[in-house]
Image (cartoon, rainbow, N blue to C red):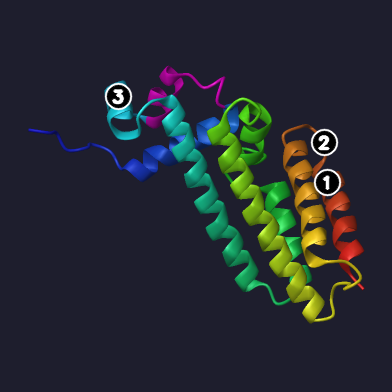
Amino acid sequence: MARSKEFDESIVLDKAMKLFWEQGYEKTSLTDLVEHMGIHRRSLYDTFGDKHMLFLKAMDRFRAKINTELTGVIKRSETAEEALQLIINFMIYGEEDSPSGCLMVNSAVELAMRDAEVDSKSTESFTLSEQMFKDIILWGQRNGEFTSDYDAAELAEHMHTVCVGLRVMTRTSIAKEKLLRTANISIKLLCK
């Protein structure tokens, strides 16, 4: 007879996600994972497969959580400019108790060149981010907040690239105020 799980799968997956986010894939050992997740090695294998499969599930979990958070930010915003500013603030300052940077960006930098599954997940996430920016820019163009001199898709590519750079730089000792100034210039370039 199979034993019932003695842990909440989503809670331990969140713990693994944060550990991978903080340390990266290569630096995170199975011992680190079982200790941080508070489960036995056998439970990790039975529930999530191997370390690589757990990592891919952690990437999916991260994307879903961030998507939910950013969708809420957009819905609460009264203007497209406000939505962009709040998203930028979220990307620079993050959430309390979360590692700096972005698991997707970190993973792309660390692994995408040699891991097709990580590359695919990162690229898919980046495509969704660009679409989010495009939707916000189109909103701003319709409302007269943002310039219509450029295609919304091209402006979205620019904003996404700026944000990827910001997410990388948040992992350094560079002052957040400097990053915010850089982001604000990108938003001002969109405005009429």
Q: Which mark is residue 174?
A: 2
* Separation of marks 1 and 2 at Cα, in angstroms: 8 Å
The residue carrying pointer 3 sits among few (fewer than 14), some (14 to 19) or many (20 or more) residues within 10 Å by Cα, namely few
**The residue stretch that appears in magenta:** 25-37
Residue 77 against residue 187 in the figure, above or below: below
In the rendered image, which quarter contains the N terminus?
A: top left
Please tell me whether residue 27 belongs to the stretch shown in magenta: yes
Amino acid type at image mark 2: Ile
Indicate the position of residue 127 as horizontal and vertical percent values.
Answer: 65, 52
Counting the numbered discs, the total is 3
Indicate the position of residue 136 as horizontal and vertical percent values.
Answer: 72, 68
Q: Which residue is situated farthest in the left direction here?
A: 1
Quadrant housing residue 109 = top right
| Secondary-structure class at tag 1 | helix
Amino acid type at image mark 3: His
Of marks 1 and 3, which one's residue comes earlier in the chain?
3
